[in-house]
């Protein structure tokens, strides 16, 4: 009988053992939750950086192609919200076709418009969003110094003052900044 009494008194866990088990389980679940939360946050940060990097790569590539395929003797003009140049880089034909490419920095976006009066063609592309501020500067050949678009535009027209390079500085809503410099080929032709 003594063995039966011993088994009847040991049939379950005491209240204290259950509470300790619950506390330990809760702590373990909280630690797992923290690790998973941090993992998700890190994943989002990496995705955002890769996304911005990919967008900036595309933007930089299009900008570079526009300048490298600039029409010799073609115009390069500064506007209030960007700049415009004549280039053979276009999205309509694989062959080089002269278009006016207008880069517009407004409304927290970067857009590129291309048009050809010959073909009655006009198209617009959104290249980036979330731009909180931007600055486009040009390298003047006369002074060999950087000037803002407004400064360059307000100067009297001079034949000996051409744009040798363009510098674009972008700041995004999340605080990241990007700067791109592009040389203007055929600046003296």
Image (tube, rainbow, N blue to C red):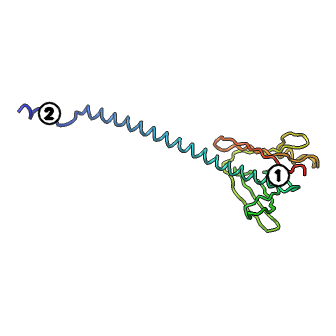
Residue at 77% over, 54% down: 66
Q: In terms of sequence position, does the residue under pointer 1 or pointer 2 come before the other?
A: 2
Give the residue furthest to the front. 95
Q: Quadrant of the N terminus?
A: top left
Front in this rendered view, residue 144 or 153: 144
- Compared to residue 35, the image places residue 120 above or below, namely below
- Are there few (<14), some (14-19), or many (20+) residues within 10 Å of tag 1? some
Q: 159 or 33, which lies in front?
A: 159
Mark 1 vs 2: CB contact within 8 A: no
Q: Quadrant of residue 94?
A: bottom right
Q: Residue at x 86, y 47 (%)?
A: 163
Q: Does residue 52 appear left or right of residue 76 in this picture? A: left
Residue assigned mark 2: 9
On screen, 107 above or below 31?
Answer: below
The residue sitting at 85% across, 46% down in the picture is 164
> Tag 2's secondary structure?
helix
Where's residue 82, x and y in %?
Answer: 79, 51
Q: Where is residue 5? Give x, y as percent.
A: 9, 33
Residue located beneath label 1 in the image: 79
Q: Quadrant of residue 10?
A: top left
């Amino acid at each position: 009988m003594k063995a039966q009494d011993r088994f009847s008194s040991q049939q379950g866990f005491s209240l204290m053992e259950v509470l300790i088990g619950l506390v330990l389980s809760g702590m373990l679940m909280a630690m797992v939750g923290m690790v998973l939360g941090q993992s998700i946050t890190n994943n989002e940060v990496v995705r955002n950086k890769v996304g911005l990097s990919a967008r900036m790569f595309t933007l930089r590539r299009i900008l570079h192609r526009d300048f490298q395929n600039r029409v010799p003797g073609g115009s390069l003009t500064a506007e209030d919200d960007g700049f415009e140049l004549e280039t053979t880089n276009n999205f309509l034909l694989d062959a080089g076709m002269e278009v006016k490419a207008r880069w517009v920095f407004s409304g927290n976006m970067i857009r590129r418009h291309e048009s050809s009066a010959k073909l009655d063609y006009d198209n617009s592309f959104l290249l980036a969003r979330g731009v909180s501020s931007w600055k486009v500067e040009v390298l003047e050949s006369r002074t060999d110094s950087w000037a803002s678009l407004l400064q360059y535009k307000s100067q009297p027209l001079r034949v000996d003052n051409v744009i040798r390079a363009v510098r674009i500085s972008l700041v995004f809503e999340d605080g990241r900044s990007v700067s791109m410099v592009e040389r203007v080929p055929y600046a003296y032709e």
